[in-house]
Amino acid sequence: MSKARVYTDVNVLRPKEYWDYEALTVQWGEQDDYEVVRKVGRGKYSEVFEGINVNNNEKCIIKILKPVKKKKIKREIKILQNLCGGPNIVKLLDIVRDQHSKTPSLIFEYVNNTDFKVLYPTLTDYDIRYYIYELLKALDYCHSQGIMHRDVKPHNVMIDHELRKLRLIDWGLAEFYHPGKEYNVRVASRYFKGPELLVDLQDYDYSLDMWSLGCMFAGMIFRKEPFFYGHDNHDQLVKIAKVLGTDGLNAYLNKYRIELDPQLEALVGRHSRKPWSKFINADNQHLVSPEAIDFLDKLLRYDHQDRLTAREAMVSHPMLFAAREMMHTHTSNKLELLRTAELARNRQDEIHLMEPLSVTCFHHMVRSQQSKNCITSFQRAKLSFYKLALPKPQNTITS
């Protein structure tokens, strides 16, 4: 049996109420407190909008959940509540639902994110170290609270580069860690799945998040996104084996007494380990230092127990020395810069706030697809109108 090297017994030592999300009674807020401004994203389980709290005129993010089991919704809410106030964890502000469809929505703090495909190619060596350090703060905190994120990837790391603010979002796949428990391996996004998921090792732990972080980091320093580009789950393991080699994979399988499916074993074949230097080129060499390579090497390990923990990475790895020093020595200057940037942006928001598509317009576009007849207005959209465009949940929360 495999157990986490750190924070092993957090949930063993805490009262059942902390991790028993099925017993959660949801406290519903007022849906009419929020209006939708524009759509900002969508995922497998939700539609995401920029919104506004009409009581204080503050921006927020509205995550309208698609029909899923109420158990999964309660888990996400419980985890967000437990982590509230943690460093770089997105803040859950409210939970509301539509009175007719019973569709729940989660209300989050607003982050002025820049798409990673636009942002990452512009980042300097120090920027990358800084944001990795900020992400590690969030990961170490959630791990210390007995929670695995299980979906770390660029899409779930919001960065406001002007304010140098990072938030780890989308806790829909997160889970409480209990030593020895067997978990579903159908988590994380393909390019960021750890080997443990791809070989069906179910008693995995927090170290899964560290593999995903390693994949992100490799993509950032080598400017190769995604770093492991598999076409399906089997091919994902093949892509990993072509870099890390099959000797290490076989040692991992033997240690945990795992037998690969014969078809997968044939697909993987035999490969020697590829040196990290093979990925260095003229476009990325300014981002690839010896300490960055060492950091990457200590994250992308087949054996999940051999990977750096978030705390080890933050406290002792040379790759993050500069980020740590800057954090301590320039805090006051940084705060002043952030205040100035925030004030400038607030003035801009006053100019651009009245440009969203009206809800009525959006509603008709969805229902009749007559977008040519849609006239843009300056009216913001009531959240309840958006619910009409979504399918009715089959299994809603009643408590």
Image (cartoon, rainbow, N blue to C red):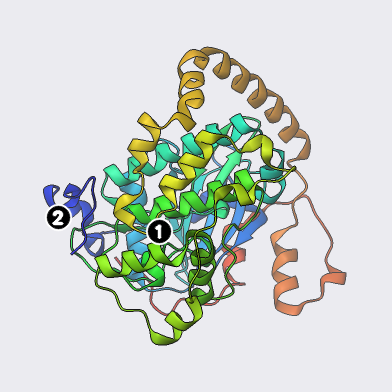
Residue found 41% across the figure and 32% down from its top: 317
Badge 2: residue crowd in 10 Å (few <14, some 14–19, many ≥20):
few
What's the CA distance linking mark 1 and mark 2? 22 Å
- The residue where tag 1 is placed is 150
Q: Quadrant of the C terminus?
A: bottom left
Relative to 45, 367 lies left or right: right
Q: Position of residue 248 (x, y in %)?
A: 39, 62
Residue type at mark 1: give it. Answer: Arg
Quarter containing the N terminus: bottom left
Residue 80 higher or lower than 253, as above or below: above
Q: Position of residue 314 (x, y in %)?
A: 39, 33
Residue 56 figure quarter = top right
Determine if residue 27 is in view.
no
Looking at the image, residue 252 sits to the left or right of residue 339; the answer is left
In front: label 1 or label 2: 1
Picture residue at 56% right of the left edge, 45% below the top: 158
- Outermost residue, bottom direction? 263
Element type at mark 2: helix
Q: Nearer the viewer, residue 159 or 76?
A: 159
Above or below, 18 against 369 in this view is above
Between 24 and 228, which is closer to the camera in this rendering?
Answer: 228
Q: Given the image, on which type of amino acid does mark 2 rest?
A: Lys
Examine the rendering and report whether any part of residue 215 can be seen: yes
Q: What residue is at 75 percent from the left and 31 percent from the top?
A: 348
Whichever of labels 1 and 2 marks the residue nearer the N terminus, that label is 2
Which residue carries the number 2 mark?
A: 16
Q: Residue at x 45, y 81 (%)?
A: 264
Q: Describe the element under mark 1 as helix, strand or loop.
A: loop
Please provide percent x and percent y for residue 354: 76, 44
Viewer-nearest residue: 48 or 156: 156
